[in-house]
Every structure is written in structure tokens, then in C-alpha cells.
Amino acid sequence: MSYAGIQMFMEKLNQLIHCNDIRFFVRNTIIRSERPQFQLLYDELGSIIQALSIHQHLEKVNDLKKRFIDAAEKAEYIVDLFLSSARLWKFQDTSEEACPSLNLDDVRRSFKSIQEEFMSMRIDSMKMNSSARTDNNQYAPANTPITRISPGSNDEIVVGLDHDVELIRDKLVEDRKKVDVVSIVGMGGIGKTTLATKVFNDRFIMHHFHVRVWATVSQTYDKRAVLVQVLESIRGQLGLEKATNSQLCEMVHKGLMGRRYLIVIDDIWDIGAWDDLKLFFPHDNNGSRILLTSRVTEVAKHASSDGLIHHLGYLNKKTSWELLCQKVFHVNEYPEWSIKPGMEIVENCQGLPLALVVIAGVLAKENWSENFWVEIAERTGLYIVNEENGCLETLGLSYDHLPLHLRECFLYLGGFPEDYKIKVEWLIWLWVAEGFIQEDGNRSLEDIAEGYLMDLINRNLVIVAYRKSDGAVKGCKVHDLVRELCLKKAKEEQFILQTESSQFSNAITPPYKQVRMFINKDTYDPHFIHLPTQDLRSLLCFGNFRSFGSRLSYNLCSFKLLRVLDLQKCGLDDFPRHMGFLVHLRYLAIWILNEKFPYSICHLWNLQTLIYITDCETMVLPYKISDLINLRHLRSQKGMLHFCQHMKPMNLQTISNVTLNDDFPKCFPYIKALRCNTFFDKCDFKSLTYLEKLKLTVHRRVESTAHNSPKGEPKNYITFPATLKALALLGCGLPWSDMSIIQSLLNLQVLKLHFQAFEGSCWNTAEQEFPQLRFLRLEGLNIKVWEAYSTSFPCLKQLEIFRCSGLKEIPLEIGDIPTLELIKIKECRHSVDESIRRIQEEQRDIGNYDLKIDVIPFEDINL
């Protein structure tokens, strides 16, 4: 549990105290009778959080925080058990003597002890502050060792970096007088230091720079140690123990003044460390350079604001095989029998040089034999993980450097299967439901969670798998070794229960600890249903294990404290009859084969995210779904949702596959993302002032077509809010003259026009301007002529035209858009392909080689 989890618990207590809209509370006299206890607990939690946050600088306060979090976790466990028992008691024929009660005495004693110890600690701290202190920062202790880490030998075996070396070397020696910063960025073990060493020892670099300095910063920035490393590189100077930091700074500045220098700052982690270091280096306008290596992209961006940031990628299979062979055999030749198991080993290392080096070390220790190589190929990950001072220790530095609010989010990634591409939207909803996201002003929890993910990506712990049309990250994944690190740390911190079925029966967790279980393969373990499941808070299944899903659905009552349940891969015949008793569920994803929307879901008052998959074509949502005051995301992946009219307003932010009715804007005023269908030609979205993403599909009736509409009545009337950032239209049948409606959306960045969104043979942008549009897709339209100007799309980065079989060509002016990076054409006329190539040729003639084209021809088009 983290502070974010405590905040979510306090919000639940606040609803228990004040909410009178949920029948689960109002009609349950047992819960209502305990409101004074809820209020007292809420006040105590708030008081301690405020005290600890204000005085977090006090020594030993971290120990108090851990004790407080543990006590709060215990309190939540007791409250949740009470609520579950009260829910079940109401529906059972039970005597008054068995009525559940809420006992928080032990928790309150723990809180009181923490408060008393904190007050005592605060008084002691105030006494210490009143006494005089001596500043010890000016001098290093006499017995403090100063370690200088030098770059490796140029004879080290390096493969696949020749192009990288050439690129960085050319940037370092180019004819620019001011001090430039070049950065090498990538995950731990990717080869950043190896590449920097290769550049540092390059003969041309050695000749070009008068002074070459290598300084390693590492996780804990020690200013004095770095200064000494620099001075030793400049002068080979020793006996610096008695010099003050100020004297060392002056010596560094004088030693570099007037000389063209190259300084390698290896393994820097913090922006603050760079801001401090850069002050030591003179700016003589003589072509001096600084080369950084870092795992943190933000550090590189800050340091190299207008310089080169080189993202070092994974090795391909060919290069990985070459590195493995040279490390093992030390020659280019290798036995024929080694190829098959060797390529399996290469595949398992996934292009990470550090992993290949570790495995090569294992292979080199033994006599070469095919059987041993086959064994290593089958257990590559195990050897890498268990290797002393191996990969996980190196990668573990990245984990140790994570701020506390990111650690739970990072560990959670270990539960997903190997090579699993995780949808970002889904991951964010899970993080929020788990209670990992800490409130921050007026920003939504989802926006904060997205920031957490981008931070992990910038730290090169998470890989971008694919992106959205606007460039935002849509899918992500983690390297297998990073996943192993997550699992290792998660076990140490008892964060995730191992997913293999053989370990279910041996699962032992401490009292009150929140357990998360990820099922990556079907299990027939009979012990599973007899687990101590009261501690189980999350259960996610990643395969179509119908047998497991069916057994689980019959035993849901034993999982009464579940918060997260994801069974969207397990097709169930019927909706589990006890699901309505899981009142703590915040996230539910479920696939029911042949059943419409069940009423019992309306009892899940904690629900934040609901993903409901069914083979039914339509689902009518019950009126009481508006009782779900915490529901923010509702997604139907197959069936079309129909809401009852005259519902109470809801707090939904995301809805998909919903059919519009007249009351929709009143019932869902806070919608941000909407995928909807309608049979009406009139759609008024203007009152949805939070709406940012809209996909609208109009199913047009024959009687509402342009030829049959009554005289004087406006047809295809659609309005949009000014907040819209992404818009996709299908079947609207709008005339191109109505494009002015969309052109007036000043915040619009993504526009997708699908089949029959607009009708007519000619689109002339004329004076229209789309000031923020970055992505434009035209698909399946009956357009023949497109007249456009570069000034119409001043920010466009990507243009896609798919299956517009009547279109003759792309306007040449499109190529003059300065921001345009990519044009994709699919299944269009040959003349369209030719116009795209003419655009590319014209741009290359004027020196623009950045514009890329991607053409997939459609051979069946009649030319």
C-alpha cells in the first residue's frame, strides 16, 4: 500500500460517511450505525498524513511512514471485511447474534503510538535545530576513498556499433565553436558505456581534442569525486585530499581553459547533477564537447537542448550472434553444431548486449559441447538471473533510483506474460484501480498515471510498442530481463503472488497484505479454491482458460475482497451469480457468451472501470446503473449499449459502443472519450464541454437521405465542442462545404474521415485552415478531386489515404508543409502513387530528405 492507496481508502470512507444516494448504504442499518467510526478513522488518517508530509525531513520519519502505511492497510482490511460481511448478512437468514461488527481498537492504538512517537521525534528535532552546527561540506573526510573509473580498453570485443561510433564522432568534431553536448541514452546493459569508450579511444578523436576527460557519476552524485576524476585526467594530479571543493572547481576550470576538450560524463542520473557539473567547464568557443551517457531520457533532453540525443537500440539477430561467438570462441569461426542452440540463446537475450555477454561467460567456462549449449538455450533466462554480479544487478540500479510513487507501477508490469504488448489505456485503468496513483491538484488520476508511464519510458525501463495517430503511446512492453527484475523485486516485497499453478498451494502471505495473482496458463490445481483468498485483491487471467473461469465463478464468495478481476479472455456461459457480493471491485472485465447485461452489476458501488464483452448484439443497461457513482470507464467491445432515458447524471469519462438518445448530454456531462452510434442525422455534442475524443458512426435510414428530407429542414446537422482533440466520422453523409464545422475546432489534432463521412467528388480547402491538425486520414471516400494548400495544414505530420479509389492525385502543395514527416497510401489509383513520388522528388530537390512515403498498391484498380 502507498499514500495513493490510503487516499483512495479515505475517499471510500468519505462516501460511507456522507453518501445517501446508494441503496447499499441507505438500506443497510448495520453500515449506517458505524458511520461515527468511519468518521473517526477518516480524521485520524488525515491528521497523520498531514503531519508526516509536513515534517518529512525529520530523521527516522521513514520508519514511521512504513508503520503508518502498515496500520492503514490493516484498517482497510478490517473495514472491507466488515462491509462484505454486512452485505452477505443482509441476504442470509442469520440471527441477530451473528450480526457483523466493526472493531478498530487495535488500529487506533497503533495510530496513537505513531502520533506520540512523532511528537517526541519532532520535539527532539527542534532542540537539535536550536544548537549550532558545523558545515562539513567544504572538506572531504581524510579517510574517504576517491574512486576513479577509467574507460575500458579499445581492444574490448565490440560489434554492431560502427555506425553509432561514426555518427557520434562526426557530431563531436563538426565545425561549431560553442560547447556542444551529445548524449547517449538507453536502458541498463544496452552498451552506452561501451559505445562512449569506443568513441573516446577513436584515433581521430584523440587527435582532434587537446584534452580528453572521463568521469563516472553513477546513481549517487558525489561532486568532489567527479572533480577529482577530472583533475586526474587532466594532470594525473594526486594529493588533493586537503583541497576544498571551491579550490577543486577552480583547478578544473583553469586546467581546461583555452584547450579544446572532450569530457565524457558516464552514467549520469539526475538533472540537478548536470546543472551543478556544467558550471565547472569553460566556454571558450573553441569546439569543446561534452558526451553524456544516461538511462534517463529527460536528463539528456535537459543537457542536450539543441545537441544530438542518440538512443541506443537493441542488437539485431545477426549482430547478437556475432557478439556471442566472438565472446565465446574469440574468432569468427564456430562449430556447425552451435548454430541452432546458439540462435535460440540469441533469441532469448532479445538483443541486450549485457545478457549476451553474461551468457557468453557461462558458455566459455565449460568445455564446448552441443548438449551444454542446448541446456543453456532451454534455460537462458535462469542462467542470466542467477549469474552473480550479472544483468539483474545492473538493471536493479534503475529500480533503486525510482522514486517511491513509481515502484508499484513498475513492479506491476512483472505480472504480464513475456513479450506481452500492454494497451496503455487498460494499464492506466488498472493502476488507478489498484490505488497506485497519487492525487495531484485538479489533474485526473488517469492523466497522472499517463505521466507515471512516460516517466518509466523516459527511464528506459518500458519500451514503446506502438503509438496512436497523435503520437501518444498506445501500447508498451518490457524486455524479458526487466520483467525478471520486476518479478524478483515483487517477490522480495510480497507484491505479486507467482503466477505458476504449481505454486498456488504453497502461497503464504502475511496478514492484511494485498496479494495480486496473474494467471498466465490454465490451472487444474485443486488447492487453488482453498487458498487463503481473503487477502487476494487482484486476479488477472491472460488466456482463454474456460475451465479456470468456470471454477472461479462458482467460488467467487471466497474472493470477497477482490478489487481487480479481469476475465475478458475467459468466455463464460453465464454471469457468476455471486458477483454482486464483490462490493470492493474497482475494475471488472468479463466476457459472457450468451447473456445480456446483468442487474447485479449495479450493486458494485466501488466500480471504476467496467469492460463487458458479450455475443449479444445489443444490451439495455438498467436504470440503476446510475447508482455506480464511482464508474468512470464503461466499455463494450461487441454488443451495442442502450441507456434508459431519464437517468440520473453519471461521472463517466469514457464510453464505447453506445447508442445516443436525447438525454445523453444531460446524463453524461463529464464525458472525455466517446465512441457512439446513432440513427439520427442531427447530433448536438456542443454541450459536452469535457469531450476530447469522439468517434461517431451514423447509420443512415433511406428516408433521411438528401433526396427525401423535407424542404426547409436542415439535414446532417452536427455540432462539436471546442475542446475536441481527436475526431473520427463514419457514415455522416456531410457535404464537403460543411468542413467549416470541423475547421473551426481550434484544438483538433487528429481527424479520421471514414466511409461516407463526407460525400461529394471535390474537396477544396480554399481558405480553410486546420491550425493544430497533426494527423489526417481519408478512407473509403468517393472523392475524386482534392484541392489543398500547404497553409491549410501548418502543423500536419502524417497524411494517410486508404481505399479512395476515385481520387486522381494528391495536391503537390501538400509536400510544402514544413512539418510533414510521412505520407501513407493504401489501395489507391496508380496516379495517386505517382503524385506522391513527385512530391517526394520535389522535396529532395530542395534538400528535404525527412519526408517518407509508404505506398501499398492496389493492383485491381482499373487504371
Image: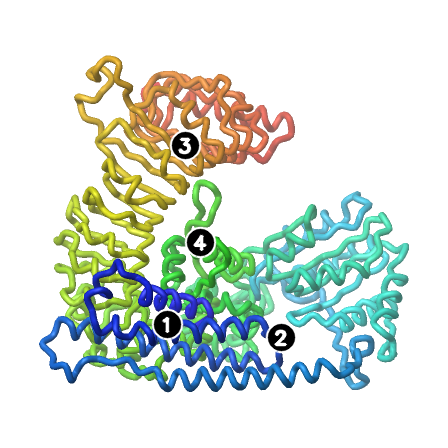
Q: Mark on residue 777?
A: 3
- Are the two marked residues, 2 and 3, in contact with CB atoms closer than 8 angstroms? no
Residue occupying image coordinates x 88% and y 55%:
259
- Residue 538, image x, y percentages: 32, 69
Report the Cα–Cα distance between label 1 and label 4.
25 Å
Report the Cα–Cα distance between label 4 and label 2.
28 Å
Report the Cα–Cα distance between label 2 and label 3.
53 Å
Dot 4 lies on which element? loop
Q: Quadrant of the N terminus?
A: bottom left
Relative to 225, residue 783 above or below: above
Residue assigned mark 4: 444
- Of mark 3 and mark 4, the one earlier in the sequence is 4
Report the Cα–Cα distance between label 3 and label 1.
54 Å
Q: Please state which amino acid type lies under the numbered disc 4.
A: Ser
* Residue neighbourhood size for the residue with mark 3, other residues' Cα within 10 Å, grouped as few (<14), some (14–19), many (≥20): some
- Residue 127: name its quadrant: bottom right
